[in-house]
Image (cartoon, grey):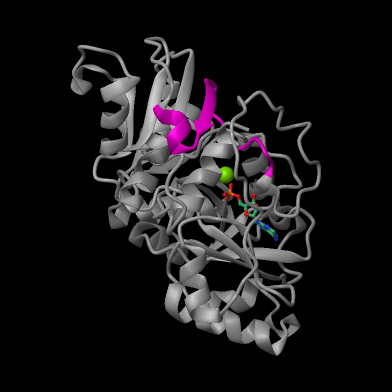
């Protein structure tokens, strides 16, 4: 494995590797992706092997311009309304953290779509992702660059730890802006439906195309992450929707804010609050006595000020850090349910599923 910068020479090198059927980890605005040439089934097979991802779990095809859409999606199979929705969403939310599920062109290998007749497409807005896609084959199939079922990487160190010896190149893009995966929206059926909440909120989508069906929501807590991903739903509608996904190794419990406030302190556990005020309230009554917050690496907040975007951007990095610190358990508080809140909570519930 070689770590690359975003220099033009490095991008050319990585693009050559993609064309030669190798795997390149690249930054996007959401999480790091494990990229391969969409049209090379052998390269796709390597992605599944490296990630140990089940073959029924389809990849997202990343493009760097709308002209590439035609090579991947069979737009003639969309209804007129579907076509209009696609045009409107592409015009206002692409490039960005929105993945659209569309009818697939037969040139896209089945392996990329988990055998489905539809394909998931995204136009990321990270400049290095765009450069790599354009300089290679114009269509990179890429899941998140983590072993299946484990936390998505938002920093190169996460990738190095998890897949470092198994990929050819990693392009370093530093810390990523959004930090949770893209929203997956199905446009292939008559009623558009969010299959996975993510970096674009349902509100933002509805402002543009009107009502969409929301994702299956998980409201209440509070189970440890002992579910085995292999015995969870065998053929989920949107396969990333397996109950246990994004899981840390440490047992994670998720609580509504009022429940979190009542948790008794245990110095061998970690506590992940949504914001600073919530953490401080807890420190005021249930938390450890006589300890300053700075002295406690196991008591954290996703965003000090409660900014939902900062919270999303920090989510996986904080879970990684707490997971690596050997705590007995991680106790996490849900985010407020607006904007990116549902995406954050979805990841927390799955991590704790
Ligand atoms: P990842 O890139 O690891 O975030 O995973 C991509 C996710 O996108 C999959 O796990 C699915 O949930 C979703 N997805 C990809 N292609 C399709 C498709 N054709 N239909 C429904 N969901 C899809
Ligand atoms: Mg993933």
Check the image and report above or below for 318 versus 291: below
Queried whether the magenta region covers residue 130, the answer comes back as: no
Residue 64: x percent and y percent?
46, 69
Left or right of 76: which side holds 306?
left
Residue 145: tell me if it is visible.
no
Q: Which image quarter has ligand 1?
A: bottom right
Check the image and report above or below for 347 versus 73: above
Which residues, given as a range, are shown in magenta? Answer: 242-261
Q: 327 or 79, which is in the foreground? A: 327
Queried whether the magenta region covers residue 246, the answer comes back as: yes
Q: 17 or 207, which is in the foreground? A: 207
> Which residue is painted at 48% across and 61% down in the image?
136
Residue 271: x percent and y percent?
39, 24
Q: 86 or 337, which is in the foreground? A: 337
Residue 239: x percent and y percent?
70, 49
> Which residue is painted at 67% across and 41% down in the image?
48
Residue 215: x percent and y percent?
63, 57
Q: 203 or 101, which is in the foreground? A: 203
Left or right of 281: which side holds 331?
right
Residue placed furthest toward the bottom: 80
> Which residue is painted at 19% across and 22% down in the image?
294
Q: Quadrant of the C terminus?
A: top right
> Which residue is painted at 55% across and 75% down in the image?
68
Residue 175: tell me if it is visible.
yes
How many callouts does the rendering have? 0
Check the image and report above or below for 325 versus 96: above
Q: Quadrant of the N terminus?
A: top left
């Amino acid at each position: 494995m070689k770590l690359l910068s975003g220099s033009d020479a490095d991008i050319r090198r990585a693009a050559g590797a993609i064309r030669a059927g190798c795997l390149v980890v690249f930054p996007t605005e959401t999480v790091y992706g494990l990229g391969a040439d969409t049209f090379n089934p052998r390269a796709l097979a390597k992605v599944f092997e490296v990630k140990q991802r089940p073959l029924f779990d389809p990849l997202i095809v990343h493009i760097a311009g709308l002209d590439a859409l035609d090579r991947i999606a069979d737009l003639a199979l969309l209804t007129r309304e579907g076509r209009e929705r696609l045009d409107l969403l592409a015009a206002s939310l692409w490039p960005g953290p929105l993945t659209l599920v569309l009818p697939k062109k037969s040139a896209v290998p089945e392996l990329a779509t988990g055998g489905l007749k539809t394909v998931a497409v995204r136009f990321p807005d990270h400049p290095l992702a765009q450069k790599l896609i354009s300089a290679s084959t114009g269509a990179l199939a890429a899941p998140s660059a983590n072993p299946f079922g484990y936390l998505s990487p938002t920093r190169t160190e996460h990738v190095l730890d998890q897949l470092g010896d198994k990929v050819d190149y990693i392009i370093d893009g530093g810390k990523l802006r959004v930090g949770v995966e893209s929203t997956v929206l199905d446009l292939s059926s008559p009623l558009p439906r969010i299959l996975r909440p993510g970096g674009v909120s349902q509100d933002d989508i509805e402002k543009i195309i009107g009502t969409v069906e929301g994702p299956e929501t998980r409201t209440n807590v509070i189970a440890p992450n002992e579910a085995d991903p292999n015995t969870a739903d065998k053929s989920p509608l949107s396969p990333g929707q397996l109950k246990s996904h994004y899981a840390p190794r440490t047992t994670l419990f998720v609580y509504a804010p009022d429940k979190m406030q009542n948790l008794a302190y245990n110095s061998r556990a970690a506590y992940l609050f949504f914001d600073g005020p919530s953490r401080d309230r807890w420190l005021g009554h249930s938390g450890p006595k006589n300890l300053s917050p700075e002295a406690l690496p196991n008591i954290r907040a996703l965003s000090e000020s409660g900014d939902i975007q900062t919270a999303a951007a920090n989510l996986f990095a904080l879970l990684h850090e707490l997971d690596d610190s050997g705590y007995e358990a991680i106790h996490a508080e849900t985010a407020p349910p607006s904007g990116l809140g549902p995406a954050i909570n979805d990841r927390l519930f799955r991590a704790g599923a």
